[in-house]
Amino acid sequence: MILRHPLSILIANIYLTGRSGTEIVTRELAFALMRAGHRPIVYAPELGPIAQEIRARGIPVTDDISTIAAEVDIIHGNHTQVTAIAAARFPNAPIVYFTHDFVAWPSAPP
């Protein structure tokens, strides 16, 4: 696989409705990737204030993965279910999966 720069990186998170844990990680990662010259795209089935903050910086955020028309170079997954959905939508993209919690079911390793 030949990677091009900048990379289109899909960040998959179960929700962006609160202000804790993976919501903050998702926001800060998207901001850092954009500063580094990449093209982050954020997918979460449930959106809220964090999604608005990310969009305000010009980063696409969606709750419907089928609306993402861009090719994705890498999937950054924070939760099993949404990472699997992203993998099904972009089967050729490699996945980097982060387990943030071994207790909560959405974070159980695949």
Image (spheres, grey):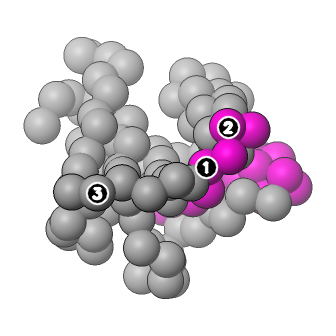
Residue 97 visible in this rendered orientation of the protein: yes
Single out the residue that lies furthest toward the right: 56
Amino acid under disc 3: Ile
Which secondary structure, mark 3? Answer: loop
Single out the residue that lies furthest toward the top: 102
Q: Position of residue 87 (x, y in %)?
A: 23, 61
Nearest to N terminus: mark 3 or mark 1: 3
Residue 39 falls left or right of residue 44:
right
Name the residue: 74% across, 38% down. Answer: 35
Amino acid under disc 1: His
Q: Position of residue 97 (x, y in %)?
A: 28, 34
Residue identified by numbered label 1 = 38
Residue identified by numbered label 3 = 2
Residue 51 sits inside the magenta stretch: yes
**Figure check: 6 above or below 19:** below
Residue 46 visible in this rendered orientation of the protein: no
Nearest to N terminus: mark 2 or mark 3: 3
Q: Position of residue 21 (x, y in %)?
A: 55, 22
What segment carries the magenta color?
35-57
Q: Residues within 10 Å of mark 2 (few under 14, many from 20)?
A: few
Q: Assign the C terminus to one quadrant of the image.
A: top left
Q: Residues within 10 Å of mark 1 (few under 14, many from 20)?
A: some
Distance from disc 2 to disc 1, alpha carbons, whole Å, reads 6 Å
Residue identified by numbered label 2 = 36
Which secondary structure, mark 1? Answer: loop
**Figure check: 98 above or below 80:** above
